[in-house]
Each structure stands twice: as C-alpha cells, then as structure tokens.
Amino acid sequence: MLSLFIVERLEVLLATSDDAPAIADMSRNLVESGLSWQWKPAAVARQILRKDTEVIVARRNKRIEGFAIMRFREDDAHLLLLAVEPFAQRTGIGRSLLTWLEESARVAGTFFVHLEVRVSEQGARQFYRALGYRERGRVDGYYQQKEAAILMTKDLRIVRQTPTKNVSNL
C-alpha cells in the first residue's frame, strides 16, 4: 500500500495588519513569558505600518509558525523580536526569518545588526552565535527589572563559512 504525504511549503513574507493578533499572541507566549505584555496587537500593527521596520511571518497552511520584527536605522538595524512556535523550532524557520532580514539590511546599506536576548535563553543565545552574532555586553534588569539581557551584534560585512555540523535553529 502506498501512502501519499503532502508537505505544505513554508512561505516567508511581509506581515499584514491581519497578522498582528497572531504575532502579538506569539510574542506574549514565547518572548514575553513572565513579563507584562508589551507587544499587544495594536503595538504590532503600528510596527507593520512603519516605513523603517520590517515585520515578516513564516506561514504554512495559512498558520503563522514564526515571525520577526526588525527596525532599520541609518547605520544599523535592531532585531526587536523573533519567535518560532515550539512545534516548528529546529526546522530552519528562525534561520529563514533572520536571513530575510539580514539581506534586507545589506540591500539598505546597513551592515550591523543588534539584538537583545534574555540571559536565561541559552538556546536562543546559541542560535544567534551559530549565525555569527557576538555577545558584546550585559544589561542587568533590562527586561522590566526582572531579568538581564545579553547584547549581541553581527557585522554583515563578514562572510562566514557555513558550519559543517548541524546547527540548531529556533
């Protein structure tokens, strides 16, 4: 007996205002856990409308499996949020989202990307390090005076060799 498996294609594309509630829920559950909720649907919708910000989603079967928000400034870019649903982590979605945004930064002539990550998020810190981000400092109490942040930066002008071993993705 033959079985037919249909695997739906993952699409990475710009978010729309209709995506704001789902992105906000993912932020509350995956990024802001244990903190007061800042990235509510209205805040996400404002970012979607900003000309200096890209909000992207990874969608499969009309369901958002991951998202990222990056603000572009004159000399650098700031990754504000990135999250991937737990069931979809380590499948390349986080890498795909970040690659999209890094390419956007290069096209815009911006070669430094900055981000903050919770000190307790060892998996996220490893993910970013594997993709060329370097830890450059720590800010105690950054997350609502409850947790420290690790500051990370990537210089997009540096061409990295692709690691030969399997790299965990969000």
Image: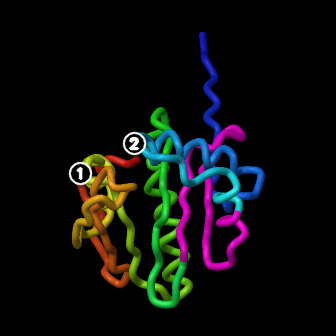
Q: Is residue 104 above or below residue 18?
A: below
Identify the disc placed on residue 74: none
Q: Within 10 Å of the Cα at label 2, are there few (<14), some (14-19), or many (20+) other Cα atoms?
A: some
> Residue at point 55% right, 83% down?
107
Q: CA distance from mark 1 to mark 2?
A: 14 Å
Identify the residue under disc 2.
90
Looking at numbered disc 1 in the image, what kind of residue is underneath it?
Lys
Whether residue 40 sits left or right of residue 166 in the image: it is right
Quadrant (top left, top right, bottom left, bottom right) of the N terminus? top right
Q: Is residue 129 above or below residue 122?
A: below
Please say whether residue 100 is one of the residues in the magenta stretch. Answer: no
Q: Within 10 Å of the Cα at label 1, are there few (<14), some (14-19), or many (20+) other Cα atoms?
A: few
Residue 139: horizontal and vertical position, in percent? Answer: 26, 66
Front position in the image: 27 or 55: 27
* 1 or 2: tag closer to the N-terminus: 2
* Residues rendered magenta in the picture: 46-71
* Helix, strand or loop: magenta stretch: strand
> Residue at point 47% right, 72% down?
102
Q: Residue furthest right?
A: 18
Q: Is residue 8 above or below residue 132?
A: above
| Camera-nearest label, 1 or 2 | 2
Identify the residue under disc 1.
165
> Residue at point 76% right, 57% down?
17
Q: Secondary structure at mark 1?
A: loop
Front position in the image: 92 or 73: 73
Looking at numbered disc 2 in the image, what kind of residue is underneath it?
Arg
Q: Secondary structure at mark 2?
A: loop
Q: How many marks?
A: 2
Residue 9: horizontal and vertical position, in percent? Answer: 63, 44
